[in-house]
Image (tube, coloured by chain):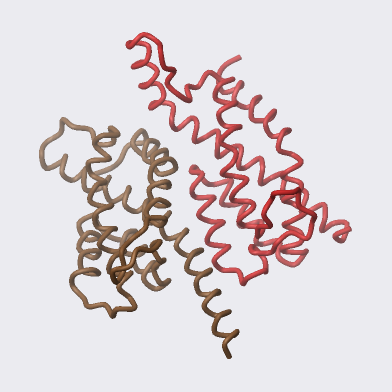
Amino acid sequence: MNQDMKIIREINLEAEGFYDEAQALGNHAYQAFKDGHRAQLTGLENVAESSLKTSDILDYIKKQISRSDPGKYWRTESEDDLPEGKVRQGFGERLKKNLEGLSMQVERVCRNADIVTKVERGRPRQDEELQRAKLKADRWKRQDIHVRLMREFIRQMVVQYEYRTGEGGE
Amino acid sequence: MPINEEQMRLLRALSDVELYQQAMGFLNAEVEINRQLERRPPLPNTQIHGLLNVAQANTYSDLQDFIKHQHSGRTWQDKNEHIKVFYKDLERAISKLPDFAKSEGLIAEGSSVEANKKEREKISQLLACEFIQHLAAENLVRERVRMDEEKMKKEGKS
């Protein structure tokens, strides 16, 4: 299997792993936008699909947060019960944290697709230097994987939002 | 001076990893304002939008001139001292970008001196633009929160 195919397979596997959290965010999105503000999520989907940088998506979310009044839209806090120790956050902040937190999944995909994520210590100097060079050269691959994972997360979240609007929020 | 696809790819990767973190670090820094140490207050929205426009529409040198003018070419009231400090620190952060670009291999040496200079200027402008975009997005959130808190305080008093 070539590397591209491995990456696709690994991203799909990771997407299964964050399904529950994406669903929870979809419910939170429904509480934030109900069924009258679908355009907010369309805008997010468009940015995610067209963006080549993770920071473009994060910056977009920040801009939307800054345009919302306290407790409304992107700053709506979830009505759901929170697990102990978790702080209640607005929808945008929670989504941003989740997308930033995908770095663990990025590491796993890279490892399983033979993309260098760190320089291993204690190896012969020549190997270390080779690894360092590869690490630098593969930066854009790690970035691309992170963007693709973000897109998956957002897709799953929006599907759950659609589902909730379709059933009238029940 | 056109930037090739390889350079753009590297620039995007650096924007996500390095410049994003640098922008967050910039806004989280403790700064001295009117002899008091505090976390850097955000710029007012008019200022941050103006800065973003200049960064997106001008050359690296023009951007540097603008930032310099904002802290040295005009007088700020005491209550706006943080704006002056912001621009002073921003000038320092932006001035490091050409060396950063070189150390990351973004500037290909070997062309004529003139061509090298042009490439350095173009890439520094692109990096500055990315840095300021990240700065602006985070600043908008912080400024909004600050304004909401101020409003709540005022309403509580009246």
Name the tint of chain B in the rendering: brown
A98 relative to A169 in the view: left or right: left
The front one of A152 and A86 is: A86
A45 relative to B87 in the view: left or right: right
B98 relative to A128 in the view: left or right: left
Which residue occupies 62% across, 57% down?
A92
The front one of B39 and B15 is: B39
Which residue occupies 31% across, 52% down?
B128
Return the x and y of residue A31 as percentages of the image width and height: 76, 61
A17 relative to B38 in the view: left or right: right
The front one of B126 and B155 is: B155
In the picture, which chain is red?
Answer: A
- Farthest front residue in view: B36
In the displayed structure, B78 sits above or below A97; it is below
Return the x and y of residue A150 as percentages of the image width and height: 60, 42
The quarter of the rendered structure image containing the C terminus of chain B is bottom right
